[in-house]
Image (cartoon, rainbow, N blue to C red):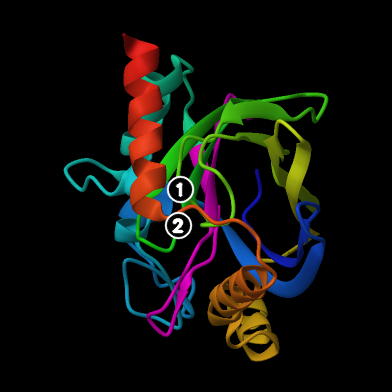
Amino acid sequence: MTEGVYEVLITHERKQPVSQFFRTRGYMLFADVARFDAADQRVLRLLGFDQARLHNLRRRDFSLIADRTRPAAAVALGALAELSGISADRVFLLANAAVLGYVFNPVSFFFFYRDGMHVATIAEVNNTFGEQKHFVLPASREGKAAVHKKDFYVSPFISPLVNFSMRIAAPAESLSIGIHTLSAKGKELAAEMGGRRRELSDRMLLLMFLKYPLHTLRVIALIHWYALKLFFNGVPHYPKAGADAAVVHKTLRRQA
């Protein structure tokens, strides 16, 4: 439960219907959500919380805490209680910050703690249409993966009706997260992220910016480049309108 900067290695491996692999390096920030409402933010000159600095964590980028009528931590803790019935007293965010005003987070993570113990995680998954969905995962002491119905359009080359298998351990000295997409035929896509914690300081923020100056731009560029390669390889794709309709129909049928 210590704030930090994680220098990460991210890998994406598609296993079917064609094989495809890419990796990229970058960094993510792990910060106390209470910082959004702290009276004094001058401790870090290169990181702002809703303040225009080199790195900026903005509430509007995270739908879980976008409601500004209450402090950010209270909004997140209330959402966890409403979605899962789990109570917590602190919440930390693992995400990319906006750098020079731009950010894209394929997925952000809210880690919840009670009396210093990790009790739950909410994964906020984004797509390139600006839509977000929340997946609640109770803490796993054994590091086991939790399986969730995806029911969300992320990629035109992955059905929204498959499952996510999420292995998300609370950040410590090291970081280890895996999100795999499972279909009836088995594992389709394996996304892994790992790294080591560094001090959350202006020196480290500057070092990471100089080492990975276009990190989030590179991530979204790679997403589109590999999607284009899948298209030219003849991988079946799911138009968004039809996929969204299928999710709605499945939901209504389940509720009937």
Residue 115 image position (x, y, % from top left): 59, 24
For the C terminus, which image quadrant?
Answer: top left
Marks 1 and 2 sit apart, C-alpha to C-alpha, by 7 Å
Vertical relation: 38 (above or below) 209? above
Q: Please, what secondary structure does the residue beneath circle 1 have?
A: loop
Q: Which mark is residue 133?
A: none
Q: Amino acid at mark 1?
A: Tyr
For residue 90: magenta? Answer: no
Query: Does the rendering let one see residue 76?
Result: no
Give 218 or 64, whichever is nearer the viewer: 218
Instruction: Confirm or deny contact between disc 1 and disc 2 (CB under 8 A).
Output: yes
Residue 98 rendering spot, x and y as whole percentages: 44, 73
Q: Is residue 255 above or below residue 131?
A: above
* Earlier residue among tags 1 and 2: 2
Q: Position of residue 20 (x, y in %)?
A: 79, 65
Q: Is residue 166 left or right of residue 11?
A: left
Give the amino acid at mark 2: Asn
Chief secondary structure of the magenta span?
Answer: strand
- Residue 62, compared with residue 255, is above or below; it is below
The residue labelled by disc 1 is 153
Tell me where the magenta segment starts and ends, as one range: 91-119
- Secondary structure beneath dot 2 equals loop
Q: Residues within 10 Å of mark 2 (few under 14, many from 20)?
A: some
> Which residue does the image show at 48% across and 17% down from the upper left?
86
Q: Which residue is mark 2?
A: 127
Extreme residue toward the front, this view:
234
